[in-house]
Image (cartoon, helix red, strand yellow):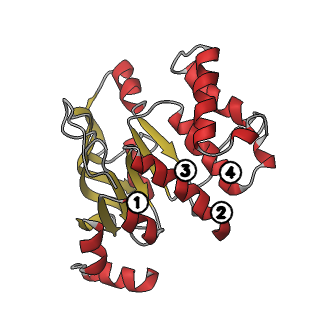
Amino acid sequence: MNNEKETNEYEYLIRTENLSKSFGHLEVLRDVDLAVKKGEVICIIGPSGAGKSTYLRSLIHLEEITSGKIFVQDKLFLHRKHNRTVHRVPADQQKAMLLEMGMVFQRFNLFPHKTVLENLILAPIIIRKKSKADAIASAAKLIERVGLSDKTDVYPNKLSGGQQQRVAIARALAMEPEIMLFDEPTSALDPELVGEVLAVMRDLANQGMTMLCVTHEMGFAKEVADRVVFMADGMILEEGKPKDLFENPKNEKLKNFLKNVL
């Protein structure tokens, strides 16, 4: 866990105000307010259907919000009211702000026809405009960082699920994001493979990476998070330090949730 937080010219790296999302008449997110400081590790927990994954997808614009505001580095990225865009940053600024966020999904989404190294260097070369030599050098360090130096030239179908997810983490890091978003990154893994992915995430947290993690791994949340957020019915119902949230929950839905998962 990070004891010291760096000071920056902005207070919050990511912040949402009254963020809501509906699919027709189904309200998936309801007025979600959340702010993430640089270097902070936040774990979002809650039952299936709580809106946790939709919230992360909204941050990186994979879901169009119905209403609310999204700020990146304290700058208003998007403001919508009743499915109408009130404010959106220009396209070039939008691209730059989205690049501050790296996301790791439940499924690995690796390019099956490319090796581990090729998976890592493609986006930095095309989007970040890195030279191939620089991209390869950076990728090699990241592959080593996730413990897969012996798999550099291997194709994804030759890797275990845990190894593929570690490659997915390295690929997101290759874009040099300010914050990493994790959407239940261990949910698709066999139990014996979960630990190796959590170890990489734990290492990232210890090195000061800002992280917003949707997770069902309560032990990980207790150990690594600076703050835990409980979502249910599309809303944040309680948040606080892990010790307080897990040992002295106040919300009844949180109490029932913890009884079922702990």
Q: Position of residue 141 (x, y in %)?
A: 59, 32
Mark positioned earlier in the residue sequence (1 or 4): 1
Mark nearest the camera among 1 and 3 is 3
Mark positioned earlier in the residue sequence (2 or 1): 1
Residue bearing mark 1: 52
Q: Helix, strand, or loop for circle 4? A: helix
- Kindly report the distance in space between the C-alpha atoms of the residues bearing marks 1 and 3: 12 Å
Would residue 162 be seen by someone viewing this image from the given angle? yes
Mark positioned earlier in the residue sequence (1 or 3): 1
- Kindly report the distance in space between the C-alpha atoms of the residues bearing marks 2 and 1: 23 Å
- Kindly report the distance in space between the C-alpha atoms of the residues bearing marks 2 and 4: 8 Å
- Kindly report the distance in space between the C-alpha atoms of the residues bearing marks 4 and 3: 14 Å
Identity of the residue drawn at 57% across and 64% down: 187
Say which mark, if any, is on residue 163.
Answer: 4
The quarter in which the C terminus is drawn is: bottom left
Q: Relative to residue 235, is residue 250 depicted above or below?
A: below
Identity of the residue drawn at 37% across and 68% down: 222
Q: Relative to residue 94, is residue 5 depicted above or below?
A: below
Q: What residue type is labelled 2?
A: Leu
Q: Helix, strand, or loop for circle 3? A: loop
Mark nearest the camera among 4 and 3 is 4
